[in-house]
Structure formats: structure tokens, C-alpha cells
Image (cartoon, grey):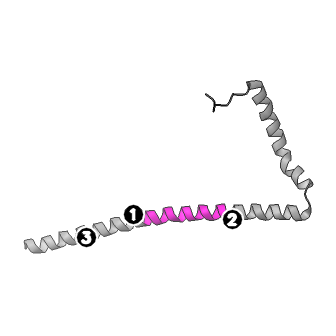
Amino acid sequence: MAGMRKRLPDDVLAYFRSEGVRGGKLGGQRAAANMTPAQRKARARKAGRASAIARTAKRKADLDAVDAQLSDLEHKRRAHAVAHTKKKHAKKESL
């Protein structure tokens, strides 16, 4: 199987994981220390935009879910009203 990757040995994976955890905690601080104020500002602006887009998408998804629930309730209400009207007319015709 030419496309399959070989799995790394467990001890190597454990080492990479431990280093990743340690390095991950320092990564942002080191990156910020090596940036100019303009670069930090640009990075913060980009992160803020990404955060705003994510919030907007979540809000839109929540509103779509509420709209779907209201649509279902409206459909049920109309179905109930139609059934009630038919029942009312059936009573009049039987008299």
C-alpha cells in the first residue's frame, strides 16, 4: 500500500506530545515578543474578525433553529384551526 503512512513508535509520539504541550503554552508569548507593535496589532485585528465571524455564524444558526421551531408551531396551530373549523361545519350540517 503505497499511500499509507508508517506509524511513529509510541515513545516518539509521547515525546512529541509532551513537547507540544510545553511549547504550546509558550508559543503565543514568544510570537508576540518577536513581533513589532504593528504586527501584533494586525494579528489581534485578524483574530478579532475571526471571532466576530464565528459569533455571527453561531447567532445565525441559533436564529435559524428558533425560526424552524416557530414554523413548526405555526404549522401545528393552523392544522388545529382547520380541523376545528371542519368539525364545527360538520356539526352544523348534521343539525
Quarter location, residue 62 = bottom right
Callout 3, which amino acid? Val
Mark sitting earlier along the chain (2/3):
2
> What span is colored magenta in the figure?
52-70
Q: Is residue 55 magenta?
A: yes
Quadrant position of the C terminus in the picture: bottom left
Q: From the viewer's perspective, is 41 left or right of 83? A: right
* Numbered label attached to residue 72: 1
Return the disc, 1 or 2, that comes first in the chain's sequence. 2
Q: Which residue is mark 3?
A: 82
| Residue at the image position 80 percent from the left and 39 percent from the top | 21
Camera-side residue: 90 or 51? 51
- Where residue 61 appears, as percent x and y from the top left, is 55, 61
Front-most of 84 and 79?
79
Q: Residue 12 placed where, x, y %? A: 78, 27
Residue density around tag 3, few if under 14, some if 14–19, many if 20 or more, within 10 Å: few
Looking at the image, residue 92 sits to the left or right of residue 76; the answer is: left
**In the image, farthest residue toward the front:** 2
**What is the three-letter code of the residue carrying label 2?**
Ala
Q: Which residue occupies 35% across, 66% down?
A: 75
Secondary structure state at the residue bearing disc 2: helix
- Dot 1 falls on a residue whose secondary structure is helix
Camera-nearest residue between 75 and 39: 39
How far is mark 2 from mark 3, CA to CA?
44 Å
